[in-house]
Amino acid sequence: MSEQSGSDPSSVDFDTAWCATDLGKYGACQYTYEDYSLESLPPLDSSQFTDAFRWMGDAGSPIQRQVMKLNGLARDLAARGLTLPRDFVTFQTTENLYGSLDEVSVTGCWTNLSDPLPSPVEAGAFLVRFFRDQQNCVIWYLYLRPLSEAFVVYSDLDYEFEYEARRDREETQTDLEDAEEQRPAILWCAPSFEEFAHRFWIENRLWHAVNDHELPMLEPQLQEYLNHYRAAWVSDVTAY
């Protein structure tokens, strides 16, 4: 795996991967999820990521309870010198965006926001859990650093649970004090929340299209994305 450190070259490097399920014959998956190399993924047009999610249509009106929740989270982070990215706030507080990844997920993933959680590998950095698999196989977090752009990581560890267990002197699954143990448990998967959401939204919609035999009806952006995997599949079949 390659490594990513966000926008600060002096900060901790993380191994990189994309965690996803299968796409039928176009993307094999041995278990519920697989870690795919970023190099194997279709490229995305970064110019469409403007913090407004226009590729999903109209964001809709603000959801006041979510605005209040995100304001509280922003205050907690500001006290630590950290800022929530605008794309994340937009997604979590508007009616046509909030919950849309839950709706499209084919593995029962759901939105689940945490308070700020100290990074177990980097002083001054914090995690905010925002999305999780229904059986906790994989959990996605915003990774926040002072004076640096937020990015998305994932892990099979629920760090909120781990910190609470340590606080209550209960047995934990991992040693939060051992940075060398923790670093490989956190994988960098997207440079921004909007890019994560876009790829997740596309791949889960493609899963339905592949399995429901609706490929001829794909809209252009999904067709273009699938063509990347189709070309790789044809190449593999031809090689045999």
Image (spheres, helix red, strand yellow):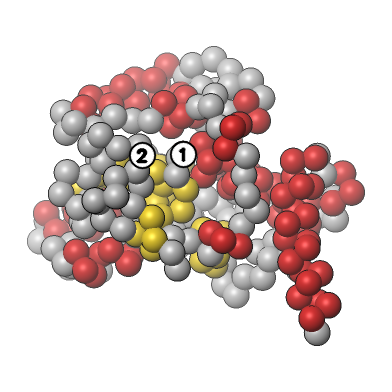
Which mark sits nearer the N-terminus, 1 or 2? 2
Image x and y of residue 142, in percent: 36, 43
Image x and y of residue 181, in percent: 23, 70
Question: CA gap, disc 1 to disc 2?
Answer: 8 Å
Q: Residues within 10 Å of mark 1 (few under 14, many from 20)?
A: many
Q: Mark 2 highlights which residue? A: 150
**Horizontal placement of 10 versus 49: left or right?**
left
Depth check: 110 or 1 in front? 1
Q: Residues within 10 Å of mark 2 (few under 14, many from 20)?
A: many
User: Residue 131: which disc?
Assistant: none
Residue that sits furthest to the bottom in the current view = 240
Image x and y of residue 197, in percent: 54, 41
Quarter of the figure with residue 36 = bottom right
Residue 97 appears anywhere in the view = no
Q: Image point 61% across, 57% down: which residue?
A: 41
Image x and y of residue 40, in percent: 61, 62
Evaluate if marks 1 and 2 touch, with contact meaning CB atoms under 8 Å apart: yes
Secondary structure at badge 2 equals loop
Quarter of the image for the N terminus: give it.
bottom left
Relative to 75, does residue 198 appear above or below in the rendering? below
Q: Image point 29% across, 50% down: which residue?
A: 9
Relative to 73, does residue 191 appear above or below in the rendering? below
Relative to 219, does residue 34 appear above or below in the rendering? below
Type of amino acid at the residue the image marks with label 2:
Ala
Q: Mark 1 highlights which residue? A: 193
Quarter of the image for the C terminus: give it.
bottom right
Type of amino acid at the residue the image marks with label 1:
Phe
Depth check: 43 or 51 in front? 43
